[in-house]
Every structure is written in C-alpha cells, then in structure tokens.
Amino acid sequence: MKDRSVPAGHLACFAAYAIFGINIIVCKDLTGGHLISPIAIFTIRSLGAGLLFWIISLFQPREKVDRRDFLKIFAAAFLGYFMTQMTFLMAIPDVTPMHCSIISSMSPIYTMFIAAIVLKEPLTWQKAGGVAISLFGIIFLILNNAGSGSGVAESSLSGLFLMFLNSLSFSLYLGIFKPVIAKYSVVTFMKWIFLFSALMSLPMSFREVFSFEWTRIPTVQMWELGYLIVFATFMAYFLIPFGQKRIRPTLVSMYSYIQPIIATVISIIIGMDILTWQKLFASAMVFIGVFIVSRSRQAS
C-alpha cells in the first residue's frame, strides 16, 4: 500500500521552492536599495516568523523537547537558516542571476553525497542519473537565458564564495538533520529554530532594528518585507520540514530547481520574457529528473 504522505511531501517542497523563486526577486530589490542591511533583514525575518510559530504553538498540544536535542536544533538553526540566509542576503547584490542560479543548482549533488555519508542513504545509478538530467535541464535554461541578454554585469569573487557557502550550508542541513526534524512537529521544531536564529543575529543588528526609521521605506518595499516574513520565511520554512518528514533529502533539495523556472514563468506573465522551446525543454528535463529520483528504490 502506497504511503499517502509522500505526495503531500512533494507538494509541500514544490510550494516552498516556488515561494523561494519569487523571493530571489524580492530580496534583490530590498538589498539593492541599501536602506536596510542584510543582518537587519535577517533579524526582522527571524523575529516575525518566530513570533508566528510561537503564537501557533499556544493552540497546539504542548510538546516537550529532549534536552539533548537542543544542541542539534541550535546547529540546525545555524546551518539551515542563519548561514543559508545571511550568505544569500550578503551575496545577492554582488552576483549575477546566472551565476547565482548555477551555483545554487549544485545543491542537490552536495545533498545526495551528504545523505549517503550521514544517513546511509544508498547512492544508486538511478538517483545519480535523475540528478544529472535535472542539472542538465537547469544549466541549459540558465545558459539560454544568459545568451538572450545584453548586460555585462559581473559577479564578485566574494559574492560567488558566499553563494557557494549558501548552497553547501543548506545541503548539510538537509542531509544531517532529518532524524531530529522527524522527531518533533513542524511548529515545535521551527519555533526553536527561529528563536535561536534571532539570538544569533540580535547582537549584530539590535541597534539598527530598534532605531530604524521605518517611514523611510517606500510602500512597495514594505510589502516586499511583509512577503519576506509571511511567505518566504514563515510559510516556506513550515513547508520544508513538512516535506523533509515525508521524502528523501536529495528529493527535497532537487526542488530548488523550481526556483529559476518560477522566475522565468513570472517574467513571461508580466511581459519581461517570452516562451520558447528551450524553456519548455529545460522544464521537462527538471521534472523528469525529479520523477526518476522519486521512483528509485531505497530507504528514506
């Protein structure tokens, strides 16, 4: 009998990474304005989403966290949120969308090997083939999009290094912490994740966050900040551990390939891009690769 929770895991990861796809555009605009520093944006996200998770927890049965697991949750907060989001926010003003997408597309490969080492998840030719097909599709999409532009923007070395750390940090989070994530409810796990994340960043951002003149921010960017807190943080980080409980780490990571596809679809809808056979081909390769990996016979 098939596990009905598996389709829910796929849907959750698809939705989370679709939200992240829009988030790339939002963060680029917020950080590009230089009104709020990356560390202040991170703290605001942590406090806002953390508050929502703690409020929801008041209406759920109380769940006690094993004292020995607090260190693991703190490490998960550091790798899965603090390092991932800080490196992204610091890198995004200094890297081109093409380079950002290429480096991010390596995440499923890192996750596949980390899960094989840490969780003893079998590394099969079927899984490697699926990852390779999706990777080919996304690189094909990126290179074709790059060829159509006329810009000459370059990425800085520091920006590229930060994006590499971003991809590696989240891969380590996906590959290492599945056991502790599976042990607790999503709300319990995430309320502690965001509390620890806020505590990590507050010493560096306290003065800016609590003395900032919010009237200086244009209305559009206030809406972007709201999207960042409610959708790209609270909702997305609820959906990812929900998916992690139900599907394998490599599959969770492969949904990162949805991000550039979503960005392309949005560009087509608002008239900034056109639909071509190359985009359809690349999208098909991504979904075929995900399907192949999802069908591989191995322990979760």
Image (tube, rainbow, N blue to C red):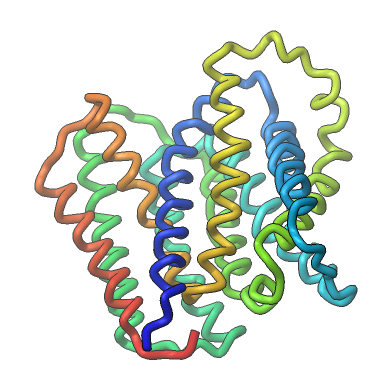
Residue occupying image coordinates x 32% and y 69%: 290
Q: Nearer the viewer, residue 44 or 50?
A: 50
When asked about the image quadrant of residue 241, the answer is: bottom right
Residue occupying image coordinates x 85% and y 47%: 199
Give above or below for 127 relative to 85. Answer: below
- Residue 157 can be seen, yes or no: yes
Outermost residue on the top side: it is 215
Residue 134 screen position, x and y as percent: 29, 65
Judge from the rendering whether residue 280 lies leftward or rightward of residue 243; answer left or right: left
Residue 285 screen position, x and y as percent: 21, 63
Give above or below for 276 relative to 16. Answer: above
Residue 278 screen position, x and y as percent: 14, 49
Give above or below for 31 relative to 238. Answer: above
Q: Nearer the viewer, residue 265 or 184?
A: 184
Residue 117 screen position, x and y as percent: 57, 86
When asked about the image quadrant of residue 55, the answer is: top right
Judge from the rendering whether residue 178 lies leftward or rightward of residue 274; answer left or right: right
Residue occupying image coordinates x 20% and y 45%: 144
Q: Quadrant of the N terminus?
A: bottom left
- Residue 78 can be seen, yes or no: no
